[in-house]
Amino acid sequence: MSIVAVVVTFNRLDLLRELVATLRVNPLLASILIVDNASTDGTGEWLRDEAQRADGVPLVPVMLPENRGGAGGFHEGVRRAMELDADLVWLMDDDGLPDPECLATLLEHRGLDFWGPLVVDREAPQELVFPIRLPGGARTVHSVDDARSAARAGRIDDIVIPFNGVLVTRELVTRIGLPRSEFFIWGDDHDYRLRAEEAGAQIATVVDAVVRHPSVGELGTPMMFGRTTYNHSPSDLKHYCMSRNNVVNLRNHRGWLFVLAFIVKTAWFYTVTRPSAKRLRLSASGIRAGLRNDFTGHGRFLR
């Protein structure tokens, strides 16, 4: 079985060095594809030198001429992995660090199409960076112990946190295609999981496999008197892409009522919870782009 690791990176050379050092000594890997989104911190030069090393797992740099975001990076990485005849693709960002036995533990679970590890906080490894909402109910687990208590036969079926150390089979990629490059950032991983679900893929989180990740802070700001949360980001680029891509995902996978609910939720958040006329205008711009399938607008935030 040929397993190719695909890592997408942008201007995080220190974290990338640590990750590559871990991957290069993993005997289960056939090769490592590093997709560099036109970094400006010396990543390209380091990758070219690293690719010349004869020891360890072969490293293949993929140098993109411009920043295509995480979505574009994973699109290109999975495409190149298919060209290398990978049976399995192991997907991850540059800020994740799999434990040495992570891949071997994932491979103990056969018959799956799209599966991955717990993603834990580097500084507080008993806490999940990305909490898991258990399928079939409203309960969300936030700790490793709770996740393992909820597991059956070492895994939680029907849920996975992409793209943080997840495995995807060649057969599933053939069925559902590549990640959507036009999303740039935000929502491409969620879209891929939903497409996998709709294709009848076997999905799971393996609770004894671990990837360590820097904390991302609160993933949702409470609103509507604490009854729900909103994914607020101070970054205009992230918020624009979130608004646009969320509309596309909801329309394609959930339906127009969910799109309307998201629009109402956004309006409430920036008029009641955190009033901001500027952010309302930005939200409206992203929502309109999503309704029109216009994926060009994020470019103005990259200049």
Image (spheres, rainbow, N blue to C red):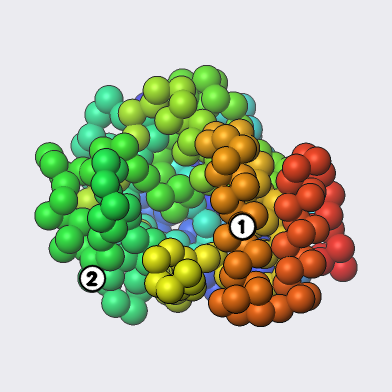
Q: Position of residue 58 (x, y in %)?
A: 52, 45
262 or 96: nearer the eye? 262
Element under disc 1: helix
Q: How many marks?
A: 2
Q: In the rendered image, is residue 98 in sight?
A: yes
Residue 294 higher or lower than 170, as above or below = below
Q: For the N terminus, which image quadrant?
A: top left
Where residue 138 is drawn, which disc sits there? none
Q: Position of residue 116 (x, y in %)?
A: 35, 45
Left or right, 81 with respect to 133, comes to right
Q: How far separated are the C-alphas under marks 2 and 1?
A: 36 Å
Q: Secondary structure at mark 2?
A: loop
Q: Are marks 2 and 1 in contact (CB under 8 Å)?
A: no
Q: Residue at x 76, y 59 (%)?
A: 284
Please name the residue shown 23% across and 66% down the image. 143
Left or right relative to 28: residue 12: right
Q: Quadrant of the C terminus?
A: bottom right
In-front residue for pair 2/302: 302
Q: Is residue 253 left or right of residue 289?
A: left
Mark linked to residue 126: 2
Task: Please give the residue where the numbered disc 1 appears in the rendered image.
Answer: 264
What amino acid is labelled 1 in the image? Val
Amino acid at dot 2: Gln
